[in-house]
Amino acid sequence: MGKLYLKNVLLLVYSKPWDIKSHNLHFKIFTIMFK
């Protein structure tokens, strides 16, 4: 699940690099999940 989630986040980040709010939200979720 972790790897799949990471892949989805990377796809989201690279497909919408201008969406900073979305990027920050996913980064927060990512850091919480993998602490």
Image: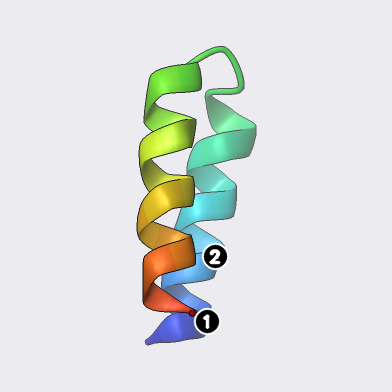
User: Residue 12 placed where, x, y %?
Assistant: 48, 40
Residue on which disc 1 sits: 3
Residue 16 percent location from the top left of the image: 53, 23
**Is disc 2 placed on a helix, strand or loop?**
helix
Specify the color scheme: rainbow
Mark carried by residue 24: none
Q: Residue at x 52, y 67 (%)?
A: 6
**Which amino acid does the dot numbered 1 rest on?**
Lys
Above or below: residue 35 compared with residue 14: below
The mark total stands at 2
Residue 1 relative to residue 12: left or right: left
Residue in the picture at 56% in, 37% down: 13
Residue at the location (38% across, 67% down)? 32
Image quarter where the N terminus lies is: bottom left
In terms of depth relative to the viewer, which is nearer, 25 or 12? 25
Q: Is residue 11 above or below residue 31?
A: above
Front residue of 24/3: it is 24
- Front-lying residue, 9 or 28: 28
Dot label at residue 7 = 2
Density class for disc 2 (Cα within 10 Å; few <14, some 14-19, many ≥20) is few
Question: How far across and how far down the image is residue 20, in percent?
Answer: 50, 19
Q: Contact (CB < 8 A) between labels 2 and 1? A: yes
Rendered residue at 52%/81% (across/down): 3
Residue 29 screen position, x and y as percent = 35, 57
Secondary structure at numbered mark 1? helix
Local packing at callout 1 (Cα closer than 10 Å; few below 14, some 14-19, many 20+) is: few
**Alpha-carbon span between mark 2 and mark 1:** 6 Å
Q: Is residue 7 left or right of residue 28?
A: right
